[in-house]
Image (cartoon, rainbow, N blue to C red):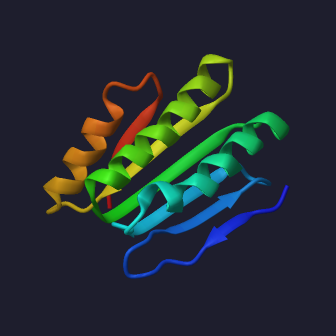
Amino acid sequence: MERLKLEPTKYTIEVDLDPDTGIFNMLGNSYPEDAMNFFEPINEWIENYISQIKRGITLNIRMNYINSSSSKCFLDIFEILENYAADGGEVMINWYYKEDDDDIYDAGEELLEDMNLPYQLILY
């Protein structure tokens, strides 16, 4: 399985999903014009990883800005990971936030608090 790397743009996050390590990084700004279209190949890649590799996953998320449609797309990713964890897969989500960025902290807390997944809100 090949690594998925997407370069960031003004409106989209940098994505680096490494099948060899199980470390998935997403960082930057997320307010694409069509969030569902942007995140669809990411979701498909993660689903393929889960079905083919069946290894632990660490998802590192470090947002500068996230809009509501991107938040919904992150919920979709978390649901995929939640199903994987329910089937015995190992998952850890690290949501990074800056000390003075209450919006990003709150977004991470709101998105993750109702999920049945281990996560950390990490100050950087």
Q: Report the quarter where the N terminus lies.
A: bottom right
Q: Residue at x 76, y 37 (%)?
A: 55
Q: Is residue 52 left or right of residue 63?
A: right
Q: Quadrant of residue 87?
A: top right
List x then y, in percent, for residue 10.
38, 81
Asked whether residue 54 appears in the rendered view, the answer is no
Q: Is residue 44 left or right of residue 55?
A: left
Q: Report the quarter where the C terminus lies.
A: bottom left
Q: Quadrant of residue 72?
A: top left
Q: Residue at x 73, y 37 (%)?
A: 50
Vertical side of 34 occupied by 73: above or below: above
Q: Nearer the viewer, residue 9 or 58?
A: 9
Q: Nearer the viewer, residue 106 or 46?
A: 46
Q: Is residue 104 left or right of residue 33?
A: left
Vertical side of 29 occupied by 72: above or below: above
List x then y, in percent, for residue 94.
44, 46
List x then y, in percent, for residue 115.
40, 26
